[in-house]
């Protein structure tokens, strides 16, 4: 808030974008008149603004498709809910340089330019808030930044993409539906875009993980440095074998502190069926934070959708009205290092013949990898026979080298699949 004659005035807010999230932000402000003495929506910018004009927005709000007109009004806060990196990155910089605080839901922008924008905010004694960038309506960033500030955080892991979680939890529920059928249902329900590649291939979750690493560790990990693996190869057979192991499969995003840097990855992994991740169904998000002193803390809730994300945006706006000064934060460069030793799940689909198991065992042994279990479900055709080998904890480089050698054999009907098994790793270690 700013003052006039000693009287505190509401923050004048300009909204960049009037899509699903922007319209939901405006609706909350309109439908909660008790907020009017703290937040005043003054401008809405959107391309093709005449088509977007909504009759329920008060006549005191100025609609424009000229961004210069919005900045000429010198708002106290610019809310950016358009998305993408440019041109909105330039608009966010302009707002901070002009003396406006910024609230954004833009994970891609923060993943690409978070350190620069945070430094710019500090330089101009402004605030950059982004609760809505990760977890939708889940108060995740506030919970980590404020609620866990007393702990030495060591690990962040979670289900950060609602589309992937919906797809995998549907497949885990049973039946033999291929992923393509489940994705079609996800599109009809509004959980998946026409092109879901960013969701199922890990780019969306990766950008969110960059933001969470910044909040938890004050380090900026480059999105391009985070290994990302798609969930596309996961089949109904994988869930059948996972159940035999007391597990299920989810798209996991993980970053954890190591002595020399941070281990990070996004991709499918086996988790225990009774864990927070294994029990989570549908499009909800779940994030678990590990600390040296407090152990695990978990956050869960609706991770997507206009209303849920808008709640986080308005919460950031209200936070700006409650404190006159914040020293801001800085994300220093963070180095990505290799994974610690873990057990792995190896699934093969082969044209059956004698000697296949012996050949695989020999290659694994050559890399110092020990068998744990061999699983083979009945009822599959011999020319397309799936089976699973689980191995004891080993280095990621060893399993990758072994799979690279095994894939050269001529008995494969499908490429082999290797998944890490995250079975109750202690966040305090």
Image: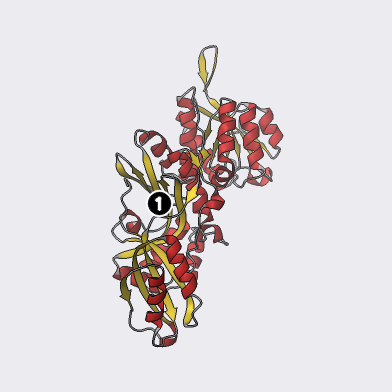
Image check: 233 left or right of 292?
Answer: right
User: Whole-percent x and y of residue 124?
Assistant: 59, 26
Q: Which residue has dot 1 on it?
A: 158
**Quadrant of residue 341 in the image?**
bottom left
Closest to the observer: 45 or 356? 356
Residue 374 shows in the view = yes
Q: Residues within 10 Å of mark 1 (few under 14, many from 20)?
A: many
Q: Is 7 rendered above or below residue 211?
A: above
User: Whole-percent x and y of residue 149?
Assistant: 37, 34
The residue positioned farthest toward the top in the image shown? 5
User: Whole-percent x and y of residue 362?
Assistant: 39, 76
Closest to the observer: 55 or 390? 390
Residue drawn at (61%, 33%) of the image? 61
Image check: 386 left or right of 108?
Answer: left
Closest to the observer: 71 or 134? 134
How was this image coloured?
secondary structure
Q: Is 5 rendered above or below residue 92?
A: above
User: Whole-percent x and y of residue 27?
Assistant: 51, 40
């Amino acid at each position: 808030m700013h003052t006039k004659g000693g009287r505190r005035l509401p923050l004048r807010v300009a909204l960049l974008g009037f899509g699903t999230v922007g319209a939901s932000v405006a609706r909350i402000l309109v439908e909660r008149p008790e907020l009017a003495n703290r937040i005043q929506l003054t401008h809405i910018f959107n391309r093709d603004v005449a088509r977007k004009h909504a009759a329920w927005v008060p006549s005191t709000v100025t609609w424009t498709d000229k961004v210069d007109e919005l900045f000429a009004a010198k708002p106290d806060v610019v809310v950016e809910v358009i998305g993408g990196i440019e041109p909105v990155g330039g608009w966010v910089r302009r707002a901070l340089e002009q003396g406006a605080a910024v609230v954004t839901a833009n994970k891609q922008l923060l993943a690409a330019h978070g350190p620069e924008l945070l430094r710019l905010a500090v330089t101009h004694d402004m605030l950059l808030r982004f609760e809505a960038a990760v977890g939708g309506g889940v108060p995740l960033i506030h919970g980590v930044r404020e609620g866990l500030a007393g702990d030495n955080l060591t690990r962040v892991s979670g289900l950060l993409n609602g589309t992937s979680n919906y797809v995998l939890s549907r497949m885990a529920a049973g039946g033999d539906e291929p992923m393509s059928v489940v994705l079609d249902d996800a599109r009809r329900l509004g959980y998946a875009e026409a092109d879901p590649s960013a969701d199922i291939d890990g780019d969306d979750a990766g950008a969110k993980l960059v933001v969470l690493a910044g909040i938890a560790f004050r380090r900026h990990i480059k999105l391009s440095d985070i290994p990302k693996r798609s969930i596309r190869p996961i089949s109904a057979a994988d869930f059948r074998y996972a159940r035999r192991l007391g597990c299920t499969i989810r798209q996991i995003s993980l970053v954890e502190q190591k002595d020399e840097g941070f281990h990070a990855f996004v991709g499918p992994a086996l988790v225990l069926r009774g864990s927070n991740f294994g029990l989570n169904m549908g499009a909800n998000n779940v994030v678990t934070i590990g600390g040296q002193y407090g152990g695990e803390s978990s956050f869960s809730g609706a991770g997507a959708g206009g209303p849920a994300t808008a709640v986080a945006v308005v919460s950031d706006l209200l936070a700006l009205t409650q404190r006159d000064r914040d020293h801001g934060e800085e994300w220093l460069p963070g180095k990505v290092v290799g994974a610690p030793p873990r057990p792995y799940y190896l699934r093969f689909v082969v044209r059956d013949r004698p000697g296949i198991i012996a050949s695989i065992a020999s290659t694994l042994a050559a890399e110092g990898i020990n068998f744990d279990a061999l699983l083979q479900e009945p009822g599959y055709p011999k020319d397309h026979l799936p089976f699973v080998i689980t191995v004891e904890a080993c280095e990621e480089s060893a399993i990758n080298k072994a799979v690279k050698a095994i894939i050269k054999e001529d008995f494969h009907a499908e490429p082999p699949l290797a998944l890490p098994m995250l079975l109750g790793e202690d966040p305090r270690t």
